Image (cartoon, grey):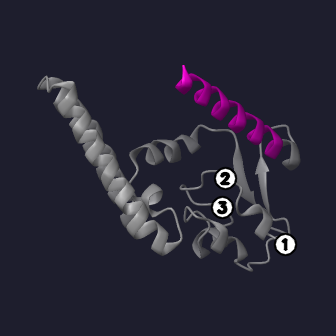
Amino acid sequence: MRYKWALKSIVLFLVIAAALVLRWMKVPVLNATLLAIGFGVIGLGLIVLISRKEGRMVHCTAYCPIGSIVNLGCFINPMRLTIDQNSCTDCMACTSRCNYDALNPGDIAARKPGISCTLCGDCLSSCHSGALQYRFPGLSSRSARNLYLLITIALHASTMALARI
């Protein structure tokens, strides 16, 4: 897991540095766009060749600079996915459902999802004891999940609408 964060940090740094250098060198927009497309094609290659083979989102957890920024945002996001100390049975059923490697055995033992948790909720249905829950200050677990879904759907709908303008 540590190598993934090192790789993601390096990729994020290189993307930011490349953007600044391209701007500083006044590289034409077409050339910069072609470089960005090349970066995207590498990401697609990772999806097709590695992520599909592994059955996990390797491209998100080890390559994507946007994923890195989103993962670091968890430190300021009040929404959390928690593992209840008392009801978790250590069955590890959730580990196979987590596509982002945020619920590996070490995370389960620590009773805290890893930093790569995207709050997708795919793991919730696999937890037969109900130990995995959304938390938001002042709300019940069910209300926190509903709030998360409302925010996610609203943001998705608004960005899709803007993309069509």
Circle nearer the viewer, 2 or 3: 2
Residue at the (26%, 47%) spot, across then down: 38
Which quadrant holds residue 165?
top right
Which quadrant holds residue 151?
top right
Category of crowding for the residue at label 2, using alpha-carbon neighbours closer than 10 angstroms: few (below 14), some (14–19), many (at least 20): some
Residue at the (46%, 58%) spot, across then down: 61
State the SS at label 2: loop
**Residue matched to label 3:** 112
Q: Would you place residue 86 above or below residue 138 in this image?
A: below
**Is the stretch drawn in magenta largely helix, strand or loop?**
helix
**Residue matched to label 1:** 128
Q: Is residue 22 visible?
A: yes
Q: Which residues are magenta?
A: 144-165
Residue 73 screen position, x and y as percent: 54, 40
Q: Upstream in the sequence, badge 3 or badge 1?
A: 3
**Residue matched to label 2:** 120
Residue at the (59%, 55%) spot, across then down: 117
Does 48 appear in magenta?
Answer: no
Q: Upstream in the sequence, badge 2 or badge 3?
A: 3
Category of crowding for the residue at label 1, using alpha-carbon neighbours closer than 10 angstroms: few (below 14), some (14–19), many (at least 20): some
State the SS at label 1: loop
Which of the image's four quarters has the N terminus?
Answer: bottom left
Residue at the (40%, 50%) spot, across then down: 64
Q: Amino acid at mark 2?
A: Cys
